[in-house]
């Protein structure tokens, strides 16, 4: 009986513990379900967060077409340097003569650093928006109005620069050809007419280069263009030691000045023409419309890599500009002309003639770099960004015809500079607004 009672009590105890175990199990299951629910909720939240971040990233990068670049860093440096280098280098010695050596160096350094910083801001804007085209960047910031304004400003500025370069060809090439032919300046058949020569140069040299598909291919011609300007710099330095500052022809504008006054460099100068120095220096560094097209074709592109391209290009141009200005000034001092080449008047000097031809070649080879920007802006505005050969050739031909007509019928370069100045102010406003 005792064993039976003990067994009964044991059974009752087991039965009594069953509900307790069930409750514990249920509670455990409930806890597991809650925990799983929290984990699942966390996973869902993380997944939605990742999806949101991805969508946000894609939204930010919606301008970027992810087209890989193919242009090396070296070729990009050549293209950007060629875009910076232009006819502005010819006026830097005149700017130095009206500011003095120290003030000119301060202005040149300041403009160089500000230009590099402005390109850094431009690259940051491009990275944040994913836009590598000015029109899209303007649309992101200001909407459709910004897109149209940026198209107009960059197109006018680049077109004005191309017109100024072709004006140099129109005015300088006939004289060079007449000299090579041994003819006088009065010799004027149709084949040495500046208007005819502009058309021949445009469709014989510029058109084939503009028909290239990618801007990177122009790295070779840009390198040759820069070589021509390096040759110009070497000749300027050489002429400093060949031409005496006491030459009466150099003192024709200041007949009462002594040799000591005429041959003494000035370190700080203020006069009525000093105010023109800063615009002259700033014009010599204008290249910003070409930055994004060059950036978009850079191989393995990144903001850091493009900034390196910018730094190398601007440092090289800074050195060339300063050396050209200082040696040009130390050759002619206060009698330097606004166009440095104009002071080398000897018509029998083969070296000076060669330099003139080199400068002409340099500006001719700069035109295609600027033309690429204008054409790509036009395609972007028309939303025809996919390459099509027939459209590419037709638009290139039509644009060059229009540019030639403007060069032929616009009477003076000052009308072009007015348009370029207006476009530059619009670009500056856009950069500050961004």
Image (cartoon, rainbow, N blue to C red):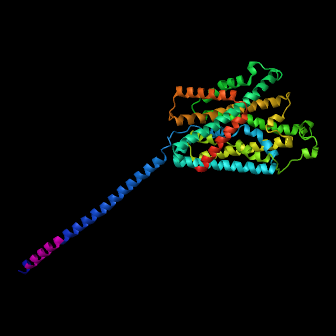
Q: In the drawing, does residue 35 fall left or right of residue 332?
A: left
Q: Where is residue 227 in the image (x, y as percent from the top left)?
A: 72, 35
Examine the rendering and report whether any part of residue 210 can be seen.
Answer: yes
Identify the residue shown where x is 60% and y is 45%: 306
Per the image, is 338 magenta?
A: no
Furthest-left residue in this view: 1
Horizontal side, residue 144 vs residue 107: left or right: left
| Vertical side of 21 occupied by 377: above or below | above
Task: Choose top left, top right, bottom left or bottom right for residue 23.
Answer: bottom left
In percent of width and height, residue 167 lies at 72, 31
Q: Position of residue 299 (x, y in %)?
A: 57, 40
The magenta region covers 5-19
Counting from the top left corner in percent of width and height, residue 3 is at 8, 78
- Left or right side of 346 for 313: left
| Image quadrant in which the N terminus is located | bottom left
In the rendered image of this protein, does residue 30 appear above or below residue 301?
below
- The residue furthest top is 189
Q: Is residue 309 visible?
A: no
Given residues 68 and 94, the one toward you in this image is 94
Q: Is residue 57 left or right of residue 7?
A: right
Marks counted in the figure total 0
Does residue 397 lie above or below 243 as drawn?
A: above
Secondary structure mostly seen in magenta is: helix
Where, by quadrant of the figure, is residue 229 drawn?
Answer: top right
- Is residue 8 magenta-colored? yes
């Amino acid at each position: 009986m005792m064993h039976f009672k003990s067994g009964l009590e044991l059974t009752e105890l087991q039965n009594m513990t069953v509900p307790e175990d069930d409750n514990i199990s249920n509670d455990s299951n409930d806890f597991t379900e809650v925990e799983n629910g929290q984990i699942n909720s966390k996973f869902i939240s993380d997944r939605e967060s990742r999806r949101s971040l991805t969508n946000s990233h894609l939204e930010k990068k919606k301008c970027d077409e992810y087209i890989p670049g193919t242009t090396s860093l070296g070729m990009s440096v050549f293209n950007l340097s060629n875009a910076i280098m232009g006819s502005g280098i010819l006026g830097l010695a005149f700017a130095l003569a009206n500011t003095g050596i120290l003030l000119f160096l301060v202005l040149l350094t300041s403009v160089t650093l500000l230009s590099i910083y402005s390109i850094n801001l431009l690259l940051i804007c491009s990275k944040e928006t994913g836009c590598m085209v000015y029109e899209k960047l303007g649309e992101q910031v200001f909407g459709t109005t910004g897109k149209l304004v940026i198209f107009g400003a960059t197109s006018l500025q680049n077109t004005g620069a191309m017109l100024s370069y072709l004006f140099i060809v129109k005015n300088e090439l006939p004289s060079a050809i007449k000299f090579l032919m041994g003819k006088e300046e009065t010799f004027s058949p149709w084949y040495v007419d500046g208007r005819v020569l502009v058309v021949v140069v445009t469709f014989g040299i510029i058109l084939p280069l503009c028909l290239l598909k990618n801007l990177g291919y122009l790295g070779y011609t840009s390198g040759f263009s820069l070589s021509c300007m390096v040759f110009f710099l070497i000749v300027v330095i050489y002429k400093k030691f060949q031409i005496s500052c006491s030459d009466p022809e150099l003192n024709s504008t200041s007949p009462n000045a002594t040799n000591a006054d005429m041959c003494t460099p000035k370190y700080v100068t203020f006069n009525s023409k000093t105010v023109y120095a800063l615009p002259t220096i700033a014009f010599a560094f204008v290249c910003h419309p070409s930055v994004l097209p060059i950036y978009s074709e850079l191989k393995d592109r990144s903001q850091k890599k493009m900034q390196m391209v910018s730094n190398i290009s601007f440092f090289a141009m800074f050195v060339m500009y300063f050396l050209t200005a200082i040696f040009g000034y130390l050759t002619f001092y206060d009698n330097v002309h606004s166009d440095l080449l104009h002071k080398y008047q000897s018509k029998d000097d083969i070296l000076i003639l060669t330099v003139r031809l080199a400068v002409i070649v340099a500006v001719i080879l700069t035109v295609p770099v600027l033309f690429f920007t204008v054409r790509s802006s036009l395609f972007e505005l028309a939303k025809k960004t996919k390459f099509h050969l027939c459209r590419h050739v037709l638009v290139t031909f039509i644009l060059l015809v229009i540019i030639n007509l403007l060069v032929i019928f616009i009477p003076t370069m000052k009308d072009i500079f007015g348009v370029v100045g207006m476009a530059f102010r619009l670009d500056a406003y856009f950069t500050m607004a961004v």
